[in-house]
Structure formats: C-alpha cells, structure tokens
Amino acid sequence: MARPSVIAIDGPAASGKSTLGQRLAEALGYLYFDTGVMYRAVTLAALRRGVDPNDEAAVTRLAEVVHIDVVPPTVADGRQYTVLLDGEDVTWDLRQPEVDAWVSPVSAYPGVRAALLSQQRRIAAGGRVVMVGRDIGTVVLPNADLKIYLDASLEERARRRYKEMMARGQSASYEEVLQSMRRRDEIDSRRATAPLRPAPDAVVIDSTTMDADAVLKHVLKLVEGADDHDGK
Ligand code: DC
C-alpha cells in the first residue's frame, strides 16, 4: 500500500494534535498545517479592530478580507511556525486568553468557515501534508488518505494546557483553564456547521495515558501500514 500523502488529524483542544502533527510532518518530510491558527487570526483581527465577536455578519466580512499567512518560523523562540495577519507577526498573540475565550463562537459562524475552507483545501491540494483541526477528516479533506482522531480526558487536556501557559509565563488557575476548555468543547461539538466529531473512517486514539513519543510511534506504524490486521 502506498504511504498516505494527505493526513488529517482532528480532536479537541490540547489533545496533543499539534505536537503529533508537527512531529509526524517532520518525520515524513511533509508540510504541517494547523488550521486552528486561521480561526484564531480572524478572532484576533476582530478584537483588535473593535469588531464585536458576537456580530456574525461583521466577523464574517472580516474573515473574507483579512490576509492570513502561515510561514516557517521566522524567530527561534520555540514556535512551530510564524503566523502573519495582514503582514504582522501575531504568532504569540493568537494564544492570548481573550482569543481562547472568543475563538469557539467565531469558528461556529458558517460564513467564517466558508471563507477559510477554500484556503485550507488549496494548501492541501499538493499532497504530502499533515493538516490539523476539528473538521479536517469530516469536511475539509473527506478523501484524506489517513484520518486520526486524537482524544484525551478533559482533566488531562486542561492539565496540559495549564502547564503550557505556565511555561509561557501566562497567569491562570487550573480551574479556570478547565472551565474554559469545557466551554470550548461544548461549543465546538454542538455547533451546527462542521461540529467536532470523528469521521466514520478515522482511527481514534485516546492519549490520556500516552506521552507524545508513544502517540507518534503508534501513528507512524499506521502510516507505514505496520498495523495491518495480519500483523505484517
Ligand atoms: O486547535 P485550536 O485550539 O488552536 O483551535 C482554536 C479554535 O478553532 C477551536 O476552539 C475550534 C476552532 N477550529 C475549528 O473550528 N476548526 C478547525 N479546523 C480548527 C479549529
């Protein structure tokens, strides 16, 4: 069997998708693309321009005109990529708690999703890509060669996100992170357009008790076809 060229990774916040995506792409020499940054960039643009994130029509118009570029890291500060919003480096601004708080409602707007969908498909069209998000296997790339749905318990995901935030010097309590994550999970899973759920043909991996190395090893086996039922 040919090695999968288009790989979709979906799952809830802090399930380990971006770590897996980046390491997998690196191991295979593929492009890594995290679609979450596009929704975050639209949210940040709204907040900065004084557009009310509750104003669906205004946010949708903004999503249609802002210019989002994701390029290889331009600064060696631990980032996986550099995100440019209308030319300005906003890579770390996208991780602000205010963006976290608004990105789920913004990404539930069908017009925002439509504006970003065609860009995402264009990026994947060349193949040799690992694309990460919430609806990649279900909506964006339904014909992906391999679909992974990476999950973990809510508490474990909150713990991971809390650790990340502490490492970046951001202030928050574990309890706040847990509540915010629970709220995002609910919005992402219940929205009418492209809700978070595994594609019927996705391989579901629960990473609650697995570290990043174990997840990568497992997925590399799937990629190489080492996980065939006949054990070859
Ligand atoms: O993966 P992340 O935390 O950066 O994603 C931020 C938000 O964007 C998340 O709450 C849901 C949304 N999102 C989405 O709706 N569809 C995607 N393909 C990726 C992210």
Image (tube, rainbow, N blue to C red):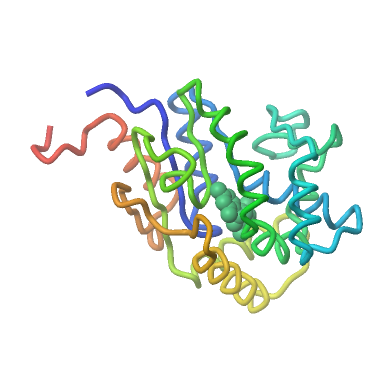
- In this rendering, position of residue 78 left or right of residue 181: right
The front one of 167 and 51 is 51
Q: Nearer the viewer, residue 58 or 148?
A: 58
Q: Nearer the viewer, residue 141 or 27?
A: 141
The residue most toward the front is 57
Residue 92 in the image: x percent, y percent?
77, 47
Q: Is residue 143 left or right of residue 73?
A: left
Say which residue appears at 57% left-offset and 28% top-offset. 123
- Residue 173 in percent (x, y) is at 70, 75
Say which residue appears at 48% left-offset and 28% top-offset.
129
Judged from this view, the residue extending furthest toward the left is 230
Rendered-image quadrant of the C terminus? top left
User: Does 135 appear above or below 72?
Assistant: below
Quadrant position of residue 33? top right
Residue at the (66%, 51%) spot, across then down:
111
Q: Write down the quadrant of residue 120 in the picture.
A: top right
Residue 141 lies, in percent from the top left, at: 44, 38
Q: Give the residue at x 86% y 36%.
A: 88
Q: Is residue 172 left or right of residue 154?
A: right
Residue 176 in the image: state x and y as whole percent. Answer: 68, 76
Q: How many marks?
A: 0
Looking at the figure, which quarter contains the N terminus?
Answer: top left
